[in-house]
Amino acid sequence: MRISKLTPSRRVRDRWTVQMEDGSFLQVGKNQMADFALYDGRELTEEELEALRRAERHDRFQSYALRVLMDTPMSRRKLVEHLRRQECPEEEAQAIAGRMVELGLLDEGRYAAEVARHYAARGYGPRRVRDELYRRGVPREHWEDALRAVEDWQEGLDAFLQKKLRGAAPDPQALKRASDALARRGYSWGEIHAALRRCGAEIEEE
């Protein structure tokens, strides 16, 4: 099939619109231009055209992965899910995710540590952070290193507790509400009791 028109993109650098004689279009980059030696009037065999379409599709999926990761860091599993929703085949999605790892744009260990620090600063405890890492698709092999990346769990815990108690001498009901809130945020009862003591609350030992 013959290329009827080849036009440089006005919006994206190093991209061209390829119009085929049947009226179909392809958006190609400089790699496809060089690999397939594209020019106006070039005749492509069916095999060449199919290979060009595969290359164009792969380039489009890879560009999408780059945009996603530049906008929002995520785990490999989540990136693959994003690609699959764009109708990218599973094997190709895994290959693109692997390429993102090679380029250093996808680093699950670094991402896990960022998630842990973010939630710890907001007053969430280790158990809740583990739940969040699971929800975000981070492999378990990175969890413990991510938790160790948090320099001070007490800081976020104490800040949350002080805001909850508002500096007043808490009554038993206020202490229970604060304790329950911290438990929901992923802290153990031992951690909660230690924090309450730091705030000056009297805790009855069982």
Image: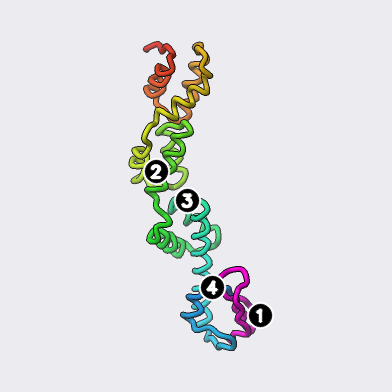
Front position among marks 3 and 1: 3
- Specify the label residue 15 is tagged with: none
Cβ atoms at labels 3 and 1 below 8 Å apart: no
Secondary element at image label 1 = loop
Within 10 Å of disc 1 (Cα), the crowding (few <14, some 14-19, many 20+) is few
| Residue 104 belongs to the span the image colors magenta | no
Q: Give yes or no for contact between labels 4 and 1 (Cβ–Cβ under 8 Å).
A: no
159 vs 42: above or below: above
Which quadrant does the N terminus fall into?
A: bottom right
Residue 21 highlighted magenta (yes or no): yes
Mark 3 and mark 1: Cα distance apart in space: 39 Å
Q: Which residue is mark 1?
A: 23
Residue topped by disc 4:
14
Q: Amino acid at mark 1?
A: Gly
CA distance separating discs 4 and 2: 36 Å
The mark closer to the camera, 2 or 1, is 2
Q: Residue at x 52, y 56 (%)?
A: 68
Which residue matches tag 3? Answer: 73
